[in-house]
Amino acid sequence: MKVYSIWMRTLITQRGRRFYLTAACGLFMVSLALLMIRSWNSRSYFRDVDFINKLQIATHDAKNELRLKNNKQDQQGGLSWIVQVSDIHLRTGDEMEIQHFQEFVDDALNILKPAVVLVTGDLTNSKTYGVKIAELPEEWSIYRRAVKERIGRNISSIWLDIAGNHDNFDEVAHSYFKANAVQSSFTASRTAIGVTVAGTGGQNVTFLPVDASLKPGIRAYNFLGYLPEDEFKNLHRAAEEAHSRGDIIVFYGHYPISTIVSSTDLTKLLSTGAAYVCGHLHTGFGTVDPMWTRHPNGLMELELSDWAHTHRFRILAFDDGRLTWIDVTHPTWPVVMISSVKRLSLGDNNYRFLLRLLVFTDEEIAVVSVRVDDNLGHWISCVHNFGPLFTATVEIHYESWDRPANEKDFIRNLQVLVGNSSGSKTLLRIGSNGAGFELPKPSFLAGIILSLRMHDVFIVIYVTGVGLCSVILILGKYQVRWEPVLSKRLISTAASFCHNNTYLGFLFALLLYPLLGPWYIGRLAGDKYGVVFMWGIFVGSTVLPGELTYPDAFFLWTTLQFPAYLLIFIKRWMSLDVNRNRCNTWLMTFLLTTLGLQLPCILAWLFLDSILLNGPIRLGLSLVVIYLWKKL
């Protein structure tokens, strides 16, 4: 201790302080840069995983072989379609929503007749009082009655459901999901099972689940998913087997890639498939809609809006190796989906377009006709090939259009008339949405959300906030002047805290305790007890990565730590002013509001045994804030 004191007196001069401060800030910025580089790794691909690179080469060769084989097929070959629905959130007491979902299962799927139905997680809501989270037998009974008991009787499609974060709250062995879901009947281990569907014309599609649900399913810290290394290898092995057969692969899961904690670059593996379909983020409840992106390595990641609020489902079609998709709000009939358009040149500025479209309606179809636009006049009747597939041949002269006759312009100007046996007719103007053939343009925000690793974004914001607030206190402690970046008044206010080591200690506890100490000690999953730290979760004999806590750390910082620190700092700032009483009422109001926001989490923990949003640590930090406010 004496050596430390001598070192501080001799080396920490005014110039030395600036040097050490600059070095600390430099290291801090380098750390943040490394975190951002790691987050962007999914787009930059710094890791070189040999077996994935080999798989990508094999995938490319297999796709070429499959394309050559499909080109030899007739017009009916190489077509299959599937349906995806996500985030159903079935809950007791909402009879109208239950009825809507049962109508979708009984009626809509019998109209669509897909080869496969993908249900990408959150089958039930599993929440009571809004904060108490646990699996509810009543909700699982609703799902079983709506789906499992109808599979053999009404639905000819293969039903593949996967667990979401709401489906394994407080679960050790996923017992509710295994007892009531459908896919659990395929095998005891649901990870990396390949379900292969034979499409028409011999085009096979294999569906591989990316099961990132936590095992065990802890009660609150599962906004992010986790894919362990051994399960990643199982998934790779299943993908390799499917590619060796020349199958097209569709990966599906609940969590978007950006919300999955994995030690390996998952994006590279998933890029060996045609697409990765998922849910979970609810497209920001419509604020980022549609939420999809195409990663630089070619992977198409499609996040579907939730059924619970939008009643939306997705149809995906594979036609001659090309994937098209369209999102539909239930009930909407008829639904027209363009699966393929080919342009042939006839010479003399004449073109022939070969059109294939899927038509789904709740009545018997009498006729389907198409025309290019109002100016080109007559309707052309489509030929019914099989099921919902209709084909048409449309010839267009170049001079009939103001611009070149390419496939996109053809689709934008296409009109489809669907006539039912009852005599009703529906005119659909395909327009800019392209009916699935021309994909909607992904938004810039959707690309960011689905590309950056969310846990890295959360920790960068948290570490940046805590670091800057701590640096200001350290500057005040050693009276470092750094003008004009930091004002003299700011440093003087920070220095006023440092005259009392107790105040300084409590302020550092407010800032640093979540980084060091346990957040919660108690029951985490079923009868399993454990400890939650920001750097790791220990449940029984299982260790889960600390990245799972980063979203909660972010919300703790934005709703308690930073507002409380700022209010305390402003109060101290004002105490150095002769007019210090002019804003006391406003500061007290903001403080009471901040503390009031903590009450639901604290009361839910004390009376409902809910640790959602960290009631225990919020209670402790709130007491620290109250103490500092009264003493300063």
Image: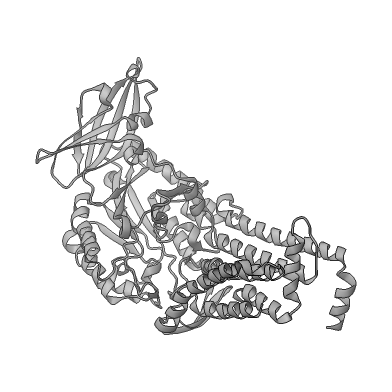
Residue at 30% over, 53% down: 313
- Give above or below for 343 relative to 261: above
Of residues 132 and 53, the one nearer the viewer is 132
Given residues 57 and 210, the one toward you in this image is 210
Number of numbered markers? 0
- The picture places residue 505, in percent across and down from the top left corner, at 69, 79
Lateral position of residue 210 relative to residue 180, left or right: right
Residue 290 position (above or below residue 397) = below
Residue appearing at x 25%, y 62% in the figure: 97
Q: Position of residue 408 (x, y in %)?
A: 37, 32
User: Residue at left 32%, top 37%?
Assistant: 340
Residue 631, by quadrant, is bottom right
Q: Quadrant of the C terminus?
A: bottom right
Q: Position of residue 209 (x, y in %)?
A: 39, 61
Q: Is residue 274 visible?
A: no
Q: Is residue 305 above or below residue 607?
A: above
Quadrant of the image for the N terminus? bottom right
* Colour convention: one colour
Q: Nearer the viewer, residue 70 or 290?
A: 290
Name the side, left or right, on which 379 lies relative to 238: left
- Residue 164 versus residue 21: which sits nearer the camera? 21
In this view, the residue farthest toward the left is 422
Name the outermost residue toward the right: 10
Percent position (x, y) of residue 454?
A: 52, 60
Q: Is residue 488 visible?
A: yes
> Height in image: 554 above or below 542?
above
Q: Residue at x 46, y 69 (%)?
A: 222
Q: Quarter-wise, where is residue 201 in the image? A: top left
